[in-house]
Every structure is written in structure tokens, then in C-alpha cells.
Amino acid sequence: MMIPEEEIERNGYMIQDLTYLQNQRLTRTITNLADVPQISDAELELSSRLATNFQQQIIQFNVAPNEIGVTPHIIHNAIGVNDEDDYDILREFMDDV
């Protein structure tokens, strides 16, 4: 079993690799949205491994949700909800659920 610092470093490398793959895919010149390249198997594998690693670390190190440091503001920025218009659109989708 790796020590926490090694696990964090490994995840950091995986995030860098995923970022590289996504940048390669998303910075290609396209003529319309239908031409956006699909997510590669490597991207899917890396993102799945990262999610699993984070879940295991949270369990292994007994991290409480309030200790993770993720605020609603951070989540909203991550999903692109930044102003009142965005919230209105998000509410429309949530009302349908």
C-alpha cells in the first residue's frame, strides 16, 4: 500500500495525463459541433481510475465530507454555473427531475 503522499502524487500525474488527452481532443479545429471528437477509451479509463482512487482515499483516510473543502461555489464554477441566468437554466432542468 502506498503512503498518502505517493497516492496524491500518482493522482496528480493521472490528472496531468487526462488534461493532456482532453486538450489534444478539444483543441482540434472543427467546423461544427457534430464534429467534436468523442471521448477516447484512455480518457474514460483515466477518469474512472481517478474517481475510484479518490473514493478509496476518502474511505481509507476517513475523510468527512465537510473536511474535503468543496464549497457550493467551487461546484458551481466547475459545472459552469456562475450567474443568475445560469441558475435559472439549471433550475429549469432540476424542475423536470
Image (cartoon, rainbow, N blue to C red):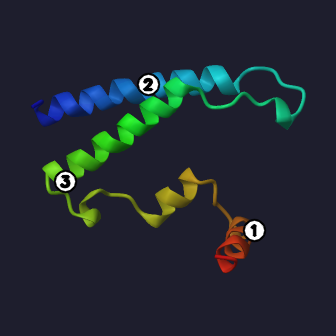
**Crowding near the residue tagged with mark 3, few <14, some 14–19, many ≥20 C-alpha atoms within 10 Å:** few
Residue occupied by mark 1: 85
Q: Are marks 1 and 2 in contact (CB under 8 Å)?
A: no
User: What is the secondary structure assignment of the residue under circle 3?
Assistant: helix
Residue 33 in the image, given as x and y percentages of width and height: 84, 36
What SS does tag 2 mark? helix
Residue 36: % across, % down = 77, 31
| Number of the label disc, if any, that sits on residue 11 | none
| Left or right relative to 39: residue 50 | left
Q: Say whether residue 12 is left or right of residue 28.
A: left
Residue at 52% in and 29% down: 43
What is the quadrant of the C terminus in the image?
Answer: bottom right
Q: CA distance from mark 1 to mark 2?
A: 32 Å
Name the residue carrying label 2.
16
Specify which label sits upstream in the sequence, 2 or 3.
2
Q: Amino acid at mark 1?
A: Asp
Disc 3 target residue: 59
Quote the CA–CA distance across marks 3 and 1.
37 Å
Between residue 8 and residue 1, name the one nearer to us. Answer: 1
Q: Splitting the image into 4 quarters, where does residue 45 fall?
A: top left
- Type of residue at label 3? Ile
Tell me, yes or no, whether the two marked residues, 3 and 1, touch with CB atoms within 8 Å. no
Q: What separation in Å lies between label 2 and label 3 (alpha carbons)? A: 24 Å
**How many tags in the picture?**
3
Residue 73 sits above or below residue 93 on the image: above
Q: Where, by quadrant of the figure, is residue 94 drawn?
A: bottom right
Where, quadrant-wise, is the N terminus in this rendering?
top left
- The local crowd at label 1, few if under 14, some if 14 to 19, many if 20 or more residues have their Cα within 10 Å, is few
In the image, residue 4 lies at what x, y percent?
Answer: 15, 36
- Amino acid type of the residue tagged 2 in the rendering: Gln
